[in-house]
Amino acid sequence: METSFHMSLPCLSVKETQDFYINNIGASVGRTSENWADINLFGHQITFIKAEKFNFNSTNYVFEGKILPSFHFGVIVDVDTWGKIYTKLNTQDLEVVTQTTFLKDKIGEHLSFFINDPNDYMLEFKSFKVPKDMFKI
C-alpha cells in the first residue's frame, strides 16, 4: 500500500513559504488561502499555517560525529532526485547543511543534507543506498 504523510506547521509568511518550496525545492502548491497553504512535497502534504514565531526549545544531537537538529522533517527520494535537488540548492544563495553519507557500508546507508526553510525549520533530504533497508535493523 502506498501512503503519504501529512504534517501541519506554523509559518511566518504563507507567500514566502510557498515561494521557497516551489522555487527552491521544486514542490507544488495545492489548496491555499490567505492564512495557509498546502505544499505537495513529493506526494506528501505539508500544510503551513500563518502564526507567530514558534519556539521549539530543542537541542541538537550527535549522530556519527555530526551535530544534527533534534527537530526536523524531510523526504526520502531516489539518488538522482537527491543529486538534482542538492545541486540546485547549492547553485542558489542558500546554506546547505551537513551533506554527508550516514551509516557508510552498514544497513541503512544513506546520503543526507539539511536546509533551513524561511520559517527556520530544518528540512532533510535522504536517499538510501538500498531503499528497502530504510526500516531494516
Image (tube, rainbow, N blue to C red):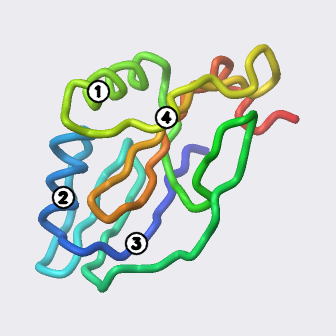
CA separation, marks 1 and 4? 11 Å
Residue type, mark 2 in image: Gln
Between 62 and 9, the one nearer to me in the picture? 62
Query: How far is mark 2 from mark 4, CA to CA?
Result: 21 Å
Give the quarter of the figure containing the C terminus.
top right
Amino acid under label 3?
Answer: Leu
Residue under the point 21% across and 24% down: 91
Q: Residue beneath label 1, please?
A: 90
Task: Give above or below for 102 relative to 28.
Answer: above
- Between label 1 and label 2, give the one nearer the viewer: 1
Q: Is residue 72 left or right of residue 34?
A: right
Cα–Cα gap, marks 1 and 3: 25 Å
Instruction: Examine the image and state in which quarter residue 32 appears.
Output: bottom left
Alpha carbons under labels 1 and 2: distance apart: 20 Å
Which element is circle 1 on?
helix
**Which comes sooner in the sequence, label 4 or label 3?**
3
Is there a contact, CB below 8 Å, between mark 2 and mark 4?
no
Q: Earlier in the sequence, mark 1 or mark 2?
A: 2
For residue 16, what is the image quadrant?
bottom left
Q: Residue furthest bottom?
A: 52
Marker disc for residue 18: 2
- At which x and y percent is residue 26? 23, 38
Kind of residue at disc 4: Phe
Give the residue number, with chain letter if any, for mark 4. 113
Relative vertical location of residue 101 with respect to residue 124 in this rendering, above or below: above
Q: Quadrant of residue 13?
A: bottom left
Sequence order check, earlier mark of 3 and 2: 3
